[in-house]
Image (cartoon, rainbow, N blue to C red):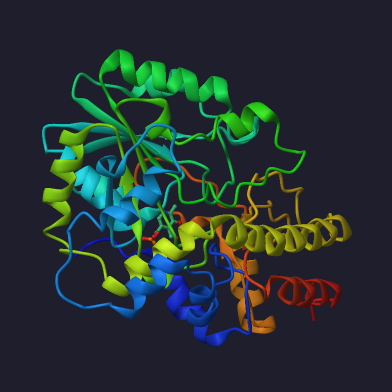
Amino acid sequence: MTEPFALAAYLSRWIPAVRHDLAASDSETTTLSDLLDLAGQDDRARWRGLGFGYLDPRGADWLRGAVAARHRRLTADDVLCCAGAQEALAAVVAALLTPRDHAVVVLPIYQPSEEAVTALCGATGVALRETEGWRLDVGEVEAALTPRTRLVLMNMPNSPTGATLDATTMGDLVALCRRRGLWLVCDEVYRHTLNRAPNLAPDRAQGTAAVADLYERGISIDGLSKGFGLAGLRVGWIACRDRRLLEAALNAKNRMSSCLCAASEVLAHVALGAEARILARSRAVGTRSRARLDALIARHPETFGADASHNLAFAFPRYLGPEGADGFARDLARRAGILVLPASLWRSRLGRVPTDRLRIGLGRAGAVPALDALDRHLRVPVP
Ligand SMILES: Cc1ncc(COP(=O)(O)O)c(C=O)c1O
């Protein structure tokens, strides 16, 4: 039996039981009719003529072209569409890793991503340095390499910490990977909700460029599930300049799902065409929630540490109460019907991950009323 997926199990247990969801990391979704209102002529024609046979397993060329256009020097043939970012990541690691290989995984990371690697080969975890603002020490990555290391995997911008890499660190990491002939695989699903407010120094923003644009062996994993609020479309992708890698990933992906859903391809194309509008809305929601959370934290300094995460999808403050983050989160769900995620859910077998923090989702329209409910709960003395 495989290890339980702690985060998914927690959500299944608590989502039906709570009134307020501060667990989500995706942005507020949209209705089909609102999305179709954003469609141009070509997409309207595609939608009207939609059929449901098997499709190009790589994704329609017009969809891959729209993804490629978001990168600096990619074309449609440098993109492989998959059923969500998670399938994209699974296809990449399946294409690259054998039991003889070794991988370095930057922690914390989404549990299924770590397990996609460790199911295939040995791996070493390198933790972001909490005491230094979740800095990645590239020297530690180098020290973890073995002659068998084939790839470095990270999720950046990172969940749950909200960390980003500054341009120097990203440059050093790319230089290390290039020197050692390593693939650099980056799950970039939280780039769309990066907080570009003044607290994000310009070099931090540069450091969040897609790795496929920075490095010939950089593999960017992305999709529409988070900032676009379209997780139900199940559209993700791999972007990489190396065509042989994409061929091998296609070979792996074809064993999981042969093609995307035809309706999702059209709707994904509509969303990419309306990216500025959709993301502006997501950012507006996230910005409002973040302001409300900052005010709440300022009112309850005995309960929460300040949050410095660089993302509008979620925050990751330290919980300071005596019962610890796990106990608080469970009690909050049970007594107040408010769901937040204790950091311990980011399980890892490769290293220590923080356990004294809470990930608080900011992207949904319901986040502000949920934060107000949390504020009221914190004002009520514990019986
Ligand atoms: C870091 C990270 N990567 C990937 C995923 C899954 O993305 P998708 O729904 O597009 O497969 C998640 C979902 O929570 C995530 O947090």
Q: Which quarter of the picture shows residue 53?
A: bottom left
Could you tell me which residue is drawn at 32 percent across and 51 percent down?
Answer: 64
**100 is higher (above) or lower (below) than 83:** above
In this rendering, does residue 120 appear at all?
A: no
Q: Which quarter of the picture shows residue 54?
A: bottom left
Could you tell me which residue is drawn at 59 percent across and 46 percent down?
Answer: 162
**225 is higher (above) or lower (below) than 77:** below
Front-most of residues 377 and 324: 377
Is 188 placed left or right of 145 in the picture?
right
Front-most of residues 65 and 174: 65
Is 353 placed left or right of 68 in the picture?
right
Front-most of residues 320 and 185: 185
Q: The C terminus is located in which quarter?
A: bottom right
Task: Name the quarter showing ligand 1.
Answer: bottom left
Residue 271: where, in percent of width, then height?
A: 48, 63
Residue 26: where, in percent of width, then height?
A: 53, 64
Could you tell me which residue is drawn at 30 percent across and 37 percent down?
Answer: 240
